[in-house]
Amino acid sequence: MPGSITSDIIKPPAPPRGGGYGGGGSDGRGASRRASMTGLMVLLAATTMAFAAFTSAFVVRRGISNDWVALRLPPIVWANTGVLLASSLLLELARRSLKSGRRTAFNRYWTAGTVLGTLFLLGQAFAWRQLNAAGIFVASNPSSSFFYLLTAAHGLHILGGLTALVYVDVQALSLRLGPSKRTAVDVSALFWHFVDGLWLYLMALFLVWG
Amino acid sequence: MSSPVVHAHHAPQGFIRRWIFSLDHKVIGIQYYFLALFSVLVGMSLSLLMRFHMVHPDAKVSWFAHLWPTAAQGGIMTPELYLSLMTMHGTIMVFFVLTTAPQSGFGNYFLPIQIGAEDIAFPVLNMLSFWTTFIALVVMVAAFFVQGGPPLSGWTGYPPLSGIGPLAGPGEGLGQTLWIVSIAIFCGASLMGAINFIATLIDLRCQGMSLMRLPLTCWTWFVTAILGLLGFAVLLAAGVLLILDRSAGTSFFIPAGLMVSDQILSHKGGSPLLWQHLFWFFGHPEVYIAILPGMGVTSQILATFARKAVFGYRAMVYAILSIGFLGFLVWGHHMFMSGMSPYSAMAFSVLTMAIGVPSAIKTFNWIGTLWGGKIHYTTAMMFALGFVSLFITGGLSGIFLGQPALDLYFHDTYFVVGHFHMIMGVAAIFGMFAGTFYWFPKMFGRMPNETLGKIHFYITFLGVYAIFTPMHYLGIAGNPRRYSDFTNFDFLGKLLPVHNFMTQAAYGTAAIQLVFFINLFWSMKYGKKAPINPWNATTLEWTVPSPPPFDNFGGQHPVVNHGPYEYSVPGAPRDFIMQTDPVDVAHAE
Amino acid sequence: MLLAPIIWVLTAVIMYFFAAKVWWFPPPINQHGLAYDAQFMRTLVITGVIFFFAQYALGWVIFRYRDDGRRASSSHGNNKWETIWTTATAVLFVGLVLTGTKIWVAVHLSEPDPNAVPIELMAKQFAFAFRYPGPDGKFGETDLKQVNDAAGNPFGLIDKDPAGKDDIVSASLKVPVGKPIKLIMHSRDVIHNFFVRELRLKQDIVPGMEIPLYFQADTPGTYEIPCSELCGLGHFQMRSTMQVMAEADFEKWKQEQAAANK
C-alpha cells in the first residue's frame, strides 16, 4: 500500500535456530526472561539515582543552615520495618517453594507476603497520622519535610511493587501461574527486596542524620 | 510486569491497535517523530516571536492582542510575555524535540532492526512511553492557556524565581506548576524508554551481532538511554522538591530573608544552589542526549555515502562511552559564576576540557572517514557533512566557556546562547534532517525528493550560520542573554544592527523549512517507490522490505557475519558487504 | 562539491570578524582585565587555528574525494594518527585551562586585601543599591521589616542602630581609582548578577548567601552594570553604573553624602 508505515506480511515462524546474543532460544522465551531481568536492573538504577538525589538534597539542606531540628521517628515506624522485612522473607520462602514445585506452599507464602506488604503501607499512613497528631507537618521543619518526602517517594515504590505482588498472587490463586510467568514472580520479588533494602537505608539515614 | 518478547507473529487488526495504541516499535518511532515535528514548529514560532520582539520591542501587532489580551495589551508584547515565550521555546525544543526525535524517534524505529530483533523488549511499555510523552506535551502546552500564562523563569527554572509563586512575576503561578508537572511526566516517559532501549540492546541482539559489530547508531542510542536513565531520575527528584517548595511551604531551595513585591516570605534555610546542582546534574547529560544520536547517524551516513568504513570504529565506540561517562562529571561548568566553591570550579573545568577530547576524536575520525572515500552527495550526506562543520564551530566555542577564568565575562552572555544553539539548535537538528533523508525510504517506502532536499539544505546551512555565528560576537561585546529588549543600555544600542541581521536571517531560515515539510509530506504519498536498499548500505535495516513487515524480519532470524561498515573491501564482488552476507564473501573479517 | 567552497568562505568570513575585532570587548580598566584579555587571545588563537584547519580539511575531503570513478580506500583507521591528534588535543585543551587557572585563583582564591574599601551591594527586583559605611567605618544593622524603597531605605537600616545613621546609600557604585574594593553582595529576593564589562568580572548574587567580590579599577570613567542572571520581567532594565573617580573626588563625595545624612 503506498505510503503505509507497516505492511502486513504474515509469514509462519521459522523453526528455532541457535541463540542470539541475548541468550536463550530464538523462540524468545529465554531472551524474554533475560530482557525482563535487565529491565528490572535498569529500573532499580533509576530509582537509586532518584534517591541519591534526595539524599544529596538531604545532606546539603542539613548542612547549610542551623534550623534543622532532629525528628523523633513515630514509634510505629519500627513495627513497619519489621513487617516489611518479614514480607520479604515470606516472598523468598515462596520462591523457594515454587522452585521445588510446592505450589500450595508458594500460594500461602506469597499471599502472606503480599498481605504484610499492604500492612506496611497502611502502617506508614498511620505513621503520618501520628506525626500530624504531634503537630508535625511537611513544612514544620526541614527534617520533617524530608521525612514526609522520602516516605512518600518510598511509598509510591511500595505501591508499584504491591501491584506486581497482587498480580502474581491473583494468577497463582486462580491457578494461572504457569512456567511462562516464572519471570514475573522473580522480577516482582527482586523489586520488593530492593524496596525493602531502600527502606532500611532510609531508616539509617533518619536515625544517623535526621 | 513485562510482556514476553515473542508475541504472536501476526499484525494487529483495527485502526486503533495499528495506528493509535500500536505496540509496533516502528509505528511508535514514527509517532515520536511527528510529535517532535509538531513541537519544533511550536518552538520555532516562539523563537521568531522572540527575535521580532528583540528588534521591535515597542511594536504594536494587532494579533498579539487577540492571542494575549493581558500580556500584550494594545498589541505590544510585554517583557513578561517575552520571557514566557523564551521559557517555553527552550523547554519545548530541549525536551520535546531534541530528546524525542533523535532517540525515541529514530532509535525506536531502527534499534531493534539494526540489531536483528523482531521488536523492542517491552512493546506495551513502549506504547505507554509514547503516550506518556504525549500527555507531558499536552500539560506543557496547557501552560499557555492558564491564568498568568507560561512561566518566565527560563528552561532552567532557577529558584527562588521559580519557587515562590506568582509574587515573582506573571506565569509563576499555575503556569510554573504545570511546567514542573509536565517535566515530571516526561521524566517518567523517558525512564520507560530507557528501560526498553537498554534491555533490547543487551538481550535481543541476533546471532553474530557482537557489541563490536553494532552500528554506531546503536552505540549512541544505548549510551543516550543510560544518560537519560540516570539523569532524568535526578531531574524528577529536583522537580518534586520544587513543587513542594511552591505548594507545601517547604524550603529546600528558598533561603530565609526574602522580600518580594514588598512581602516578606516565610521560607527558611533552603539553598538556591542545590537546585542548580540537581538540575545541571541532569542538564549536562541532557545535552549529550541531544547530540549523541546525531553523531551516530552522521557516522552511519558518512560511511554509507563515502563508500568507506568509519575511520577508527573502536576509537569511535570508546569516544561515545567516554562522552557518556564524562558527561556526568562536568555539570558544574554551568555554575562557575554561581557562588559555588572556586575549587569545585577548577575541578569541573579540567573535566570539561577532558570531554572535549573524545569529541575532537570523533570529528577527526569523521574527516578521516571521508579521506580516500568515494563521495555521493545525497541530501542525507549533505546534512551529515553539515553536521560535522556545525559541530566543529559549536564545539570550539565551548573551549572558551569551559574555562572559569573566561567565563567571568562570558557567563550569561550571547556567547553562551551562540554556543548551545550551534550544537543543539543546529548540529543536532541537522542530525535529525540527515536521519530523515537517510531512512525515509525505509520508513515510508518511498524516496524523498533530492532537489527539494538540497535546496532546503543549502539555504538552511547558510541561514543557521548567519543566525548563530553573530551571537559569539555579541557575547564578546558583553551582550547579556534573556533580555527582552536592548534599549536601556548604551553599549547594547550599538549592537542592534547585529540583532537585526540575525532576525532577518531567522525569518529566511524559518521560511525555507516549508520546503522540507513539502518534501516530507509530498514524498510520503507520491515519491518514487523505494527499493529494499536504495543506498547500497550494509546494516540490517537494508535487508528488509521498505517499509519492513510487522515483525521486521518476516519470521526469519538474521545471522550477522560482518562488521557494520564493510565498504570497498578489496576482493569483494561489490563495493559493500552487508552484515548478513556469508562469511567468505571477501577474504576479509 | 559546492559545499566545500561554501565552508571555506564561511570560515574566512567568521575568522575575519574575529580578527578585525568588529564587535569586541571594551578596553580593560584593571590588571585582571589585561590578564583576561591575554588568556582570551591564547584561546582564540588556538581555537582559531583548529577551526581553520578542521573546516579547511573538511572542505578539502568533501571536494577531493567526490565520486569520480575511483575506488574508495579500504582503510579502517590509523592508530598512529589517532594517537597523535588525541594527545595534541588533550595537551592543548588542558594546557589552556592551566594557563587560565592563575587568573581564576587571583580573583577567587587569593588573600583578600585587608585595606579594601568595603561597599555593600543589595540586589533586588529590579535595581541595584549600594551602601557605604560612612565616617564611623561601620555598617549599621539592617532588618528586612524596615525596608522601604520609596523612602530610600532599600537596605532596611534600623533607627535604633547609631552605626547606621551615617551609612551612605547610593543607586550607583562609586569607587576610588586604583584602590582595592571589596564588594559585599546580597540579594533580597531572587538570583541576580553583578557584571562590569570593563572589569572583566561577573558574579551571581544569590539570596541567602553573602558573596564578596574583590576588584580594583584603574581607569576613571563611568561603566554600565547590566544584571546578568534572569531575575524576572524587569531583568532587561536592571541597570546601574560604576563611577571610577580620583580618590580625592571619592572622599569629597562621601563627605557630601555624610553631610546630607546628618
Image: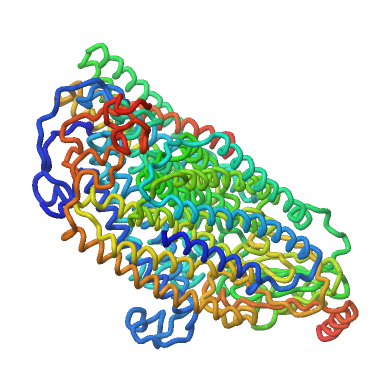
Residue furthest out toward the right: C248
Could you tell me if residue B150 is visible in this image? Answer: yes
Q: In this orientation, which residue lies closer to the viewer: B29 or C108? A: B29
Residue furthest out toward the top: A100
Q: In this orientation, which residue lies closer to the viewer: B237 or B443? A: B443
Could you tell whether B6 is left or right of C47 in the image?
A: left
Tell me how the rendering is colored.
Answer: rainbow
Rendered view: B560 above or below B132: above
Residue C135 in picture, x, y percent from top left:
88, 75
Residue at the image point whose x is 62% and y is 53% from the top: B402
Q: In this orientation, which residue lies closer to the viewer: C112 or B446? A: B446
Could you tell whether A135 is left or right of B121 in the image?
A: right
Residue at the image point whose x is 30% and y is 24% from the top: B584
Residue C36 in picture, x, y percent from top left:
74, 61
Could you tell whether C70 is left or right of C108 in the image?
A: left
Could you tell whether B222 is left or right of A5 in the image?
A: right
Could you tell me if residue A33 is visible in this image? Answer: no
Number of marks: 0
Rendered view: B214 above or below B327: above
Q: Indicate the quadrant where residue B450 lies.
A: bottom left
Q: Indicate the quadrant where residue A31 lies.
A: top left
Q: Quadrant of the C terminus of chain B?
A: top left
Residue C133 in picture, x, y percent from top left:
82, 72
Residue B127 in picture, x, y percent from top left:
24, 46
Residue at the image point whose x is 43% and y is 35% from the top: A45
Q: Quadrant of the N terminus of chain B?
A: top left
